[in-house]
Amino acid sequence: MHEPLIRIDNVTHHYGKKPALDSVSFEMQSGQVTALLGPNGAGKSTLIHLLLGLIPVQSGEIEVMGHSPSAASRAGQWGAMLQSSGVQDTLTVIELLYLFASLYPQPASIDALIEQARLEGLERTRFERLSGGQKQRVMFALALVGQPRLLILDEPTTGLDPAARRGLWDVISQRRSEGVSVLLCTHYLDEAEKLADKVVVLNHGRVLAEGSSDSIKARVPTTQILARSRLDQASLLGLPAVQSVAQRDQRVLVLTSNAAATLRAWLDADAELDELEVKGADLESAFLNLTQDANATELSS
Amino acid sequence: MTPNSMPMRRRLVSYAHFMHCQWLNLLRVPAYSIPTLLFPIMFYAFFGILMNPGAASYLLATFATFGVLGAALFAFGVGIATERAQGWYTLIRATPAPLPGIVIGKWFGAALFSSVIVVSMCAIAAFLGDVRLEQVQWWGLLAVLIAGTLPFCLLGLGLGLMLSPNAAPAVINIVYLPMAFLSGLWVPVSQFPGWLQALAPWLPPYHLAELALHVIGARAGDPWVNVLALLMFSLAFSVLVMIGWRRMLAMTK
């Protein structure tokens, strides 16, 4: 087994008396894309700020490439794109890129970065005059400028149009194939499912689940049934093992913990059941299931 | 491999980039560049040249002090409060950027603005006010005023680390304008009532103005008292900077 790129061991962090992270432990292997998922307030930003050395570790241990976060930061071994960060917005794209390039021992070619981040024609434009999506792409280029071994991306595709989003996915995949490791914090679960080798689900400052997206999905005994039915929502919720019902265009989406039992009863109740489709849970439903279960357990305790 | 701190050559290159960017940044913010450059020069032209031609050289020293005081306080105070809210320092701290680079860059920008102010005033004084100084005095005035911005840069830095971007311009104006007046930068301290005259030496701009007056030959006493006073103020404002810095780190979530 290789030495992990990031090792987080039993990290607990409080803001005043309020716990933000509670005994969080996980490892990230080199060359992987690891997605950090969790609802708002789960502790993702705190964890990223701890990893980047922006706030001191109160309890537990964090190692990045075998060093403390602040030592790794000084070596310029990562590139970060943070939700909570911005730039001096009077500077132009090219001025920002050259400023950041001056901070790293082996900066990337600025021309290549401009092409990768699709910033052609915007070089002389001030940051303040860019659209939201263009700003995101500049921030992404700034994260890449030091040719880092580790990319830490916090909500990198927020505000991007679908084409730009897919373009950024391609760059992330390309970097991964070149051996760059990526810690990806995202709310888009399709993004995590597409890009991540490993998913870590955080909720209320605790690691709720950790593994490949397939293994996370397998932890949730939920099946999705899509069908056109004449039964109303209340009747569908009354079928055995049904957890939730939602309308999807002309069909209904039923989540069930026992597909066979639900389907037998549904067919008995509705002889006109049509356009039937049964599939396993996707990462989004697994994530919702996991976090809702955890919230319910916490409330009951 | 043990991560090393940045090699000196790269450090100097990054300082140069920070200095360049800070200068451009200040120049491109009209709320900073226009009043900072225009007001002191305009005030000196009106009050120093047109209304008090006999005191043109004395008022050159005091209004130039007023000019550099504003350039330093607003570049640091408002600039840092705004950039802090933008998340600029969060991003910079996640890179190997040497932190002094930010301060040196900001100081360079403020110093360049200060130089433009002082040189413009000197030109007005020489060509319109008939002020005659030795060459060494012209250069001395510029050097003293640029070096003397240290405590004001530190005061601005401390306030910028503590204030929100909305509060910073108001608070800095409240500090700047009364401090300038009470230090005798607009009206000589000797024309104040006695109790107000006693207040002036407790304010840092008074000491910088005294040094500037020494340079142009309008003061005869020991200038080291003023140098020492400015150093003491710098020390006190450094404490404010440390408190502000810790506060900013504590507020990072």
Image: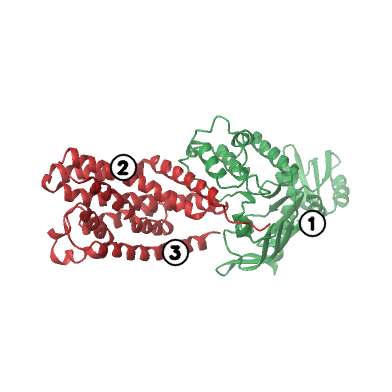
Give the CA distance from mark 2 to mark 3.
30 Å
Q: Are marks 1 and 2 on the same chain?
A: no
Residue wearing tag 2: B116
Q: Which residue, as the protein is rendered here, is positioned at the far top?
A: A121
The chain letter of the red chain reads B
- Vertically, is B128 above or below A299? above
Q: Amino acid at mark 2?
A: Val
Residue wearing tag 1: A2
Residue wearing tag 3: B242
**Badge 1 local density, few (<14 within 10 Å), some, or many (20+)?**
few
Q: Is residue B156 visible?
A: yes
Give the CA distance from mark 1 to mark 2.
59 Å
Task: Kindly check if marks 3 and 1 are in contact, taking CB atoms under 8 A apart as contact.
Answer: no
Give the CA distance from mark 3 to mark 1.
42 Å
The chain letter of the green chain reads A
Q: Are marks 2 and 3 on the same chain?
A: yes
SS at circle 2: helix
Nearest-to-viewer mark from 1 and 2: 2
